[in-house]
Image (cartoon, rainbow, N blue to C red):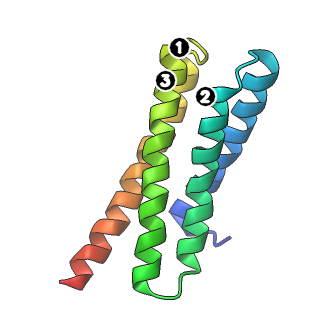
Amino acid sequence: MKKDNVIQIKSYDFAVRVVKLYKHLSQEKKEFVLSKQLLRSGTSIGANVEEAIGGQSRKDFFAKLTIAYKEARESHYWIRLLKDTDFLSDKESESLLKDIEEILKIIGSIQKTIRNKKS
């Protein structure tokens, strides 16, 4: 992993947090359905960022980044739902939401840059 690739680092760190949260929710709170959805979408962001980095073309890079953005939107949804159903505290959800919103902004900015270069 490159030390200066912000989205690669942040998406990986977010995935680590999501895995730990899944373990907590499934073991301590016996919540399996919503947390599994977050586990899938939250870890998929970084996986798609990695695929984008290894993309064979700009089009491939953009396509994988678009999937990462969609997975980040889905993760945002699951975090809010876990909060509003009292599986996550306000404090826990605030930190996760801050992280995922930052990831969304970074990916959105990269996408915008790519679109502007096409013009």
User: Is there a contact, CB below 8 Å, between mark 3 and mark 1?
Assistant: yes
* Quadrant of image for the C terminus: bottom left
* Quadrant of image for the N terminus: bottom right
Q: Nearer the viewer, residue 39 or 106?
A: 39
**Count of numbered badges drawn on the protein:** 3
Residue 80, above or below 46: above
* Three-letter code, disc 1: Thr
Q: Name the spot of residue 68 as percent of width and height, x first.
A: 49, 58
* Three-letter code, disc 3: Leu
Residue displayed at 42% across by 42% down = 101
Residue displayed at 46% across by 26% down = 80
Report the residue marked by disc 1.
85
- For mark 1, give the secondary structure: loop
Which of the two discs, 2 and 1, labels the residue nearer the N terminus? Answer: 2
Residue 118, above or below 89: below
Q: Is residue 110 left or right of residue 48?
A: left
Residue displayed at 51% across by 40% down = 75
Q: Callout 2: few (<14), some (14-19), or many (20+) C-alpha neighbours within 10 Å?
A: some
Q: Is residue 108 left or right of residue 2?
A: left
In the rendered image, which quarter is residue 34 located in? Answer: top right
Q: Name the spot of residue 74 as percent of width and height, x first.
A: 47, 42
Q: Nearer the viewer, residue 85 or 103?
A: 85
Spatial separation of the CA atoms under disc 2 and disc 1 = 10 Å
Residue 34 - label: 2
- For mark 2, give the secondary structure: helix
Report the residue marked by disc 3.
81
Residue displayed at 34% across by 59% down = 108
Spatial separation of the CA atoms under disc 2 and disc 3 = 8 Å
User: Is there a contact, CB below 8 Å, between mark 2 and mark 1?
Assistant: yes
Q: Is residue 54 visible?
A: yes
- For mark 3, give the secondary structure: helix
